Amino acid sequence: MSPLRRDTYQRLGGAGLHNASRLARHVLCAALLASVSHTVCAFTVAIAPVSPKTVYLQVGVGGFTGHYNAGGTPGNNATVNKESVTVAAAAVGNATAQAMTTDSTVGASSYDGFAFCNVPAQLYIGGFYRTTTAGGGSVNVTATVPAALVDGGGDTLPFARISWTTGGNGDSGSEPFPAGSFSAGAVQTVGTIAQNQWAESCWTFSYSNTTFPAAGTYTGRVLYTLTAP
Amino acid sequence: MRPLPRLLLLTVLVVAVPADAKTTVIDDSGTLPYDAPLVLHWQQLSPRRPVNNRMTGTLTVRVKLHVAPWLRRPGRIYLALPAQQPGAMNASWFTQGRLLPGRVSSGSRSLVYSGLITTPFIEEVLQLTLEVDGTQLRQLYHVNFRFEMDEE
């Protein structure tokens, strides 16, 4: 989750600047008066489209204080959530996918508190991309995936064994964060956020369980990134 | 009997059509800051349907109006926001009492003073808030305001 706000302008201040701006204004006014006899000065306010871009991404637990529609605002949260499954010895390698669960407690939408995801079966992912100008622009959310999960003895399990379905309570149609599976050792796109829209989905992870790895606890970390131009 | 209706008609016309008020743009070259940069913020930081793409920002403007040409004469002063890029806008302002607070939409104006002009300059501090449609912003814009004097 990474909110970002950039303000590029600073307010003018100080007598020197005021005097300089007044001189500049008089020069401008003189130029205007030279061409249009009835023109007089009028103050202006400069506005620019570059300053108010904002992005927010939340995977699992996020940084919203309250909910948006109750006056909440996005913030930072360093929590790293976990998806896990324990495969019974008798079931290892039987090709029956094993549902994973999350330690995230977030089932409610950060927008309005609606019970959107069912925890611990589903992991909430949501965010937005705020930018000026009209149009159909969008930004991608990527996952940086290690090659493999590793246990304490150095044994490995390809990340490609993990996949997910997508949905959300009350949702129909396509999801902004669709179903997929991890591409081991790659950076892959896992979703798209259209500009000036809130996007959210619920992911249900599973382990394919088609191989016979050595007994152990295998871990690996996937990094999700929202990048805006 | 015939002249009476004609007299009544003339009277009605005179009452219904006010005398032409001459409008003059007031020299506000003493206003600071010149071309003030305004930082805009989303009204709705987190968008979701229905999406509100309005943006607002507030700044302080020290207005100085050169009204000496109308000294000791009655007048009405308006703050006008001409129709201009980037499209539909709203402005509102608070004052310290010398001028009236109010709001205006682009392409219109709002009364800020009515009465006798008693000093060569009218000075006031405005807390000016501008509201624009964020999706219309494509470049840097210099939003132009002007003060207008209607002589009575």
Image: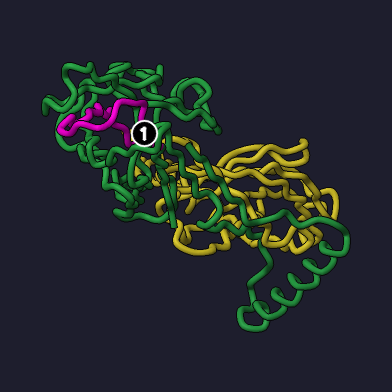
Chain colours: A green, B yellow
Q: Which x, y percent locates residue A72?
A: 51, 25
**Which residue extends farthest right?**
A15
Image side of residue A121 versus residue A39, left or right: left
- Residue visible at 36% across and 33% down? A126
The one nearer the camera, A122 or A127, is A122
- Residue visible at 30% across and 20% down? A101
Q: In this view, does B80 lie above or below A190?
A: below
Q: Which x, y percent locates residue A148?
A: 33, 42
Image side of residue A77 versus residue B138, left or right: right
Image side of residue B103 versus residue B12, left or right: right
**Can residue B100 be seen here?**
yes
Residue A203 lies within the magenta run: yes
Q: Is residue A212 above or below residue A191?
A: above
Residue B9 lies within the magenta run: no
Image side of residue B14 versus residue B4, left or right: right
Specify the quadrant of the image occupied by residue A117: top left
Q: Quarter of the image containing the C terminus of chain A?
A: bottom left
User: Badge 1 is on which residue?
Assistant: A126
Q: Which x, y percent locates residue A133?
A: 40, 56
Specify the quadrant of the image occupied by residue A160: top left
**Can residue A141 be seen here?**
no
**Which residue range is magenta in the image?**
A199-220
- Residue visible at 40% across and 17% down? A105
